[in-house]
Image (tube, grey):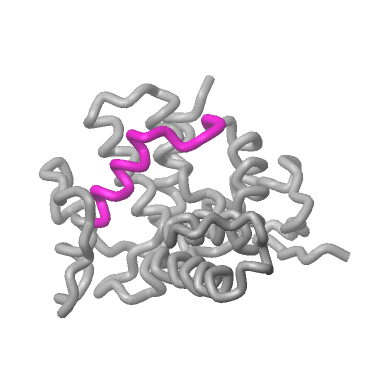
Amino acid sequence: MNPWTQTYTGIAFDLLEPHPSMVCLEDVMHSLAKMDRYNGHAVISYPVAQHSILVAKLVQAWGGTEAEIFDALTHDAIETYIGDMISPMKRAMRAALAEKLRLHPAVYPDTLPQESAFLVLAKELEPFAVVEYRVEIVVREALDMLPEQPDIVTKADLTILANERETIMAPCDRDWELPHPPSTMLVPGDFEERDWRFWKRRFHEEYERLRPR
């Protein structure tokens, strides 16, 4: 039997053979509203649903298309089923696999000698990335998202990291080395701490406002 996870509404979501019929908006809203970003290390309770609403707000402010704005709102919907693994952990997994490939090239004979090639190959072979890709395809189809995340959504997502670092994270002795400065279009009030039920309701409101007709 394939590994599966039970959702809020009682759906058995198959992680190796997912199907669009397994994706439920109620599950997405409930999960993202209760799932805190940064492994809960923000100074406030800051759920993925709140972050997603802000990414959509920024893409809209930048003049994104209707499809891009909706994609921004739902860009983390996949985390309903695989969790919110922090990006540093994903990079650590790839680095560890890349080191193994570098030391034991016979594991994958076609590996190129350049160090960067090992990292690229590690991303392709990493089990989490494989499962993540399968689930993302299904979630995007089920929610009528774009086939792939557009660049404007990726930029907004990375930009908001800078706002989050300044607003909801404690000072750190290491630089985050982010690619974009914080956006002046977001204000401290955007990061107000609210009950998860509030963010579930707000996410639903934004979903209904922005979803393709």
169 to 136, vertically: above or below: below
Majority SS type along the magenta span? helix
Q: Position of residue 71 (x, y in %)?
A: 45, 35
* Residue 95 seen: yes
Asked if residue 157 lies in the magenta stretch, the reply is: yes
* Relative vertical location of residue 212 with respect to residue 139 in this rendering, above or below: above
Where is residue 66? Give x, y as percent.
40, 23
Name the residue located 45 percent from the left edge and 72 percent from the top edge: 92
Query: Which region of the structure is painted magenta?
Result: 146-161
Tell me if I can see residue 79 in this picture. Answer: no
Residue at left 55%, top 70%? 97
Q: Is residue 110 above or below residue 145?
A: below
Q: Quadrant of residue 31?
A: bottom right
Question: Quick one: 87 or 34, which is closer to the camera?
Answer: 87
In the drawing, does residue 71 fall left or right of residue 9?
left
Q: Residue at x 22, y 66 (%)?
A: 176
